[in-house]
Amino acid sequence: MERPMIIGIAGGTGSGKTTVAQKIFDCIDKEHVAVIEHDAYYKDQSHISFEERLKTNYDHPFAFDTELLIQHLKDLRNGKAIEKPVYSFVTHTRQKERVRVEPRKIIILEGILILEDKRIRDLLDIKVYVDTDADVRIIRRLLRDIKERGRTIESVVEQYLSTVRPMHLQFVEPSKKYADIIVPEGGENLVAIDILVTKVLALLNN
């Protein structure tokens, strides 16, 4: 198997990264693509209390097990399967189970901070930044966290103001300068997604 192509899709919370990744995935033969979520690589916190876990700044680079992610990306590039962690946003720590990910021709990595770390950037063949207005992003995050993660409006807003927004301005937004392609308005930008898919398919066929 030839060395896989790794596509990194970054952007702020609620920007539409997952939607862009899914639409690329849907346009390519499934046997050729694997998707890795940066969120799966939050550090294990089973050694501390639930109350302490609630105090963690989940939008800071230190919250992620970057060493494990880098090792897994290298393993996939070398044709080795990985055991991807499973993270619970209810208990704020890793689950015992793992998800086996086989090496594929296309690896899509998506997450808010994947362009922030040079070690990760150096492993990416195509770097994408999904750029969406802040008001749209906070509304999407609010709806997602209430519906999927059992959060209250108050807790989502408090977290957004205390950590999400400051970390976005400090780490996420500046990483946009490293992108090869900037996609305004996320999954709604069908033209940009079509260009991305065309580029990926061309590289795949070559």
Image (tube, rainbow, N blue to C red):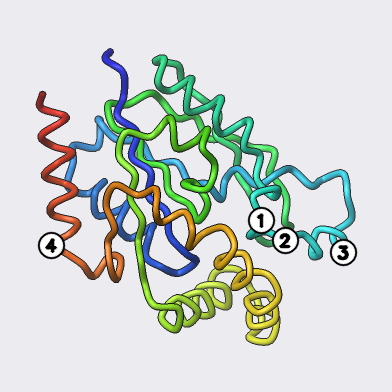
The quadrant holding residue 105 is top left
Q: Quadrant of the N terminus?
A: top left
Residue 195 has which mark? none
For mark 1, what is the residue?
A: 60
User: Please, what is the three-letter code of the amino acid marked with disc 3?
Assistant: Glu
Disc assigned to residue 191: 4
Q: Nearer the viewer, residue 49 or 69?
A: 69
Residue drawn at point x = 56 percent, y = 25 percent = 71
Q: Residue at x 41, y 15 (%)?
A: 78
Mark positioned earlier in the residue sequence (3 or 1)? 3
Label 3 SS: helix
Going 39% across and 53% down the picture, which residue do you hit? 177
Is residue 202 rendered to the left or right of residue 56? left
Q: Earlier in the sequence, mark 1 or mark 4?
A: 1
- Name the residue carrying label 3: 51
Amino acid beneath label 1 = His
**Which three-letter amino acid code belongs to the residue tagged 4?**
Val
As measured in the structure, the alpha-carbon distance from the residue carrying label 3 to the one carrying label 1 is: 18 Å
Circles 1, 4 touching at the beta carbon (< 8 Å): no
Marked residue nearer the N-terminal end (3 or 2): 3
Neighbor class of circle 3 (other Cα within 10 Å; few <14, some 14-19, many 20+) is few
Residue found 63% across the figure and 31% down from its top? 67
Q: Nearer the viewer, residue 83 or 74?
A: 74
Mark 1, other Cα within 10 Å: few <14 / some 14–19 / many ≥20: some
Image spot of residue 42 (x, y percent): 65, 47
Depth check, front residue: 51 or 59 = 59
Q: Position of residue 171 (x, y in %)?
A: 57, 58
Left-right relation of 167 to 200: right
Q: Which residue is mark 2?
A: 57
> Marks 4 and 3: which is nearer the front?
4
Above or below: residue 130 compared with residue 126: below
